[in-house]
């Protein structure tokens, strides 16, 4: 998932910090199955649509994303006027520029501390056991937090993935002087899954 440069979620990701909590959960909590893969944390099949409340530089907008085409292992998402292509590989989900595989946005193995290289930095799985509640969607346990650290400019992006749902919280912080300042926040507002009546709209 990406936002434009002025609010790009490369997988850009503190809204999720307030949404995620260890509440113990009940039978209505969606939990990941044993052995769930990275790709299952970001379903990219026909019919998926996501809507996010995005806050950037004091401005609030609604951003929508919809899977509009799936061909073999490639999925195309319509994000406003932009089309984003992802490769759903055996070991995770990566950006795809039409000719080459780009950065992985989530990658196996799904375990705390797992790392991989990204352009200008490193990505790592910071947590695999967050629990969150999205008002219109439900409660999810076993959420994965992917933290990406990059240089030039120094920035940290955190994305929370819910099992079988996709990104639900995103925050990007940029270094200004000695501290990091939050520049972009996004939180999942609603989702349409394949087979839902609204999926065909």
Image (cartoon, helix red, strand yellow):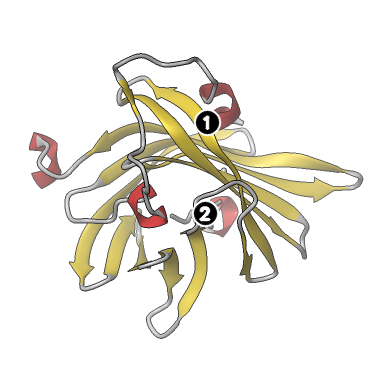
Q: From the image, which quarter does the C terminus lie in? A: top left
**In this view of the protein, which residue sits in the foreground, 80 or 85?**
85
Q: Residue 158, image x and y in percent? A: 60, 45
First in sequence, mark 1 or 2: give its number.
2
Q: Position of residue 143 (x, y in %)?
A: 47, 36
Residue plotted at (33% across, 40% down): 33
Of residues 87 and 52, which is closer to you in this image? 87
Q: Residues within 10 Å of mark 1 (few under 14, many from 20)?
A: many
Element type at marker 2?
A: loop
Residue 69, percent across and down?
20, 64
Please indicate, yes or no, whether residue 54 appears anywhere in the rendered image.
no
Q: Is residue 40 above or below residue 138?
A: below
Residue 50 visible to the viewer: yes
Residue 69 sits above or below residue 55 on the image: below
Residue 80 - label:
none
Q: Position of residue 42 (x, y in %)?
A: 36, 50
Q: How many marks?
A: 2
- Identified at 44% across, 66% down, the residue is 94
Nearest the eye: 16 or 83: 16
Q: Is residue 118 left or right of residue 42?
A: right
Query: CA gap, disc 1 to disc 2?
Result: 18 Å
Is residue 85 rendered to the left or right of residue 184? left
Please give the label number shown on residue 11. 2
Name the disc covering residue 130, or none: 1
Camera-near label (1 vs 2) is 1
Quarter of the rendering containing residue 85: bottom left
User: Farthest right residue?
Assistant: 178
In the rendered structure, the answer to whether residue 157 lies left or right of residue 8 reads right
Q: Residue at x 53, y 57 (%)?
A: 10
Q: Residues within 10 Å of mark 2 (few under 14, many from 20)?
A: many
Give yes or no for contact between labels 1 and 2 (Cβ–Cβ under 8 Å). no
């Amino acid at each position: 998932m990406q936002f434009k440069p002025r609010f790009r979620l490369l997988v850009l990701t503190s809204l999720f910090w307030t949404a995620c909590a260890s509440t113990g959960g009940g039978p209505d909590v969606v939990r990941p199955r044993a052995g769930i893969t990275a790709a299952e944390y970001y379903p990219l099949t026909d019919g998926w649509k996501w809507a996010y409340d995005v806050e950037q530089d004091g401005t609030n907008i609604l951003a929508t994303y919809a899977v509009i085409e799936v061909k073999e292992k490639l999925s195309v998402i319509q994000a406003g006027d932009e089309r984003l292509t992802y490769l759903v590989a055996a070991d995770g989900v990566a950006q795809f520029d039409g000719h080459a595989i780009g950065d992985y946005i989530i990658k196996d193995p799904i375990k705390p501390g797992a790392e991989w290289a990204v352009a200008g930095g490193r990505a790592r799985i910071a947590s695999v056991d967050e629990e969150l509640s999205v008002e219109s969607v439900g409660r999810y346990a076993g959420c994965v937090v992917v933290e990406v650290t990059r240089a030039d400019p120094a920035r940290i992006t955190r994305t929370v993935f819910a099992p079988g749902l996709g990104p639900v919280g995103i925050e990007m912080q940029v270094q200004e002087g000695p501290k990091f300042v939050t520049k972009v926040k996004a939180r999942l507002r609603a989702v349409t899954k394949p087979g839902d009546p609204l999926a065909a709209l």
